[in-house]
Image: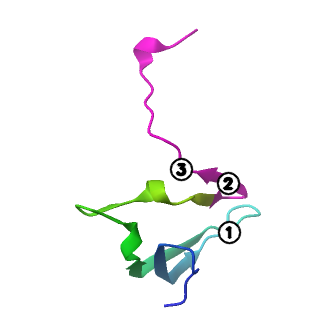
Amino acid sequence: MPSVLEAPIAFELKLDRIIPVGGDHPVLGIVERVQVDSSANAGNYKTAAELWKLLESMAGNYAGLTSTFSIDPRNRQE
């Protein structure tokens, strides 16, 4: 399956539909295959995401993976 060499996990998708929404076109796909490099395996069906520099494209903006945090409403500052 063709994939990005540096990507430890690759998905092969089958096009399901393209939905026109205003000036955008979200693309939906069905996952056909997943290829996982052994370096991505952390055991117990988990991935070692902390070993990668993840970067996601979110409609033109980019987001990365950070450490886990929680928001406790009891500690809110007003």
Q: Nearer the viewer, residue 32 or 23?
A: 32
Residue 63 in picture, x, y percent from top left: 62, 51
What is the number of the mark on residue 33?
Answer: none
Does 22 appear above or below 74? below
**Drawn side of residue 4 relative to residue 30, left or right:** right
Label 3, on which residue?
65
- Please, what secondary structure does the residue beneath circle 1 have? loop
Identified by mark 1, the residue type is: His
Q: Nearer the viewer, residue 22 or 39?
A: 39
- Give the Cα distance between marks 2 and 3: 10 Å
Report the mark closest to the observer, 1 or 2: 2
Chain part drawn in magenta: 57-78
20 in the magenta segment: no
Residue in the picture at 73% in, 61% down:
22
- Please, what secondary structure does the residue beneath circle 3 have? loop
Residue in the picture at 49% in, 81% down:
13
**Drawn side of residue 40 relative to residue 14, left or right:** left
- Please, what secondary structure does the residue beneath circle 2 have? strand
- Give the Cα distance between marks 1 and 2: 18 Å
Label 2, on which residue?
62
Which circle's residue, 1 or 3, is located before the other in the chain? Answer: 1
Identified by mark 3, the residue type is: Leu
Residue in the picture at 26% in, 64% down:
45
Looking at the image, which residue sits at the far left? 44
Label 1, on which residue?
25
Q: How many marks?
A: 3
Report the mark closest to the observer, 2 or 3: 3
Identified by mark 2, the residue type is: Tyr
Residue 78 in picture, x, y percent from top left: 58, 8
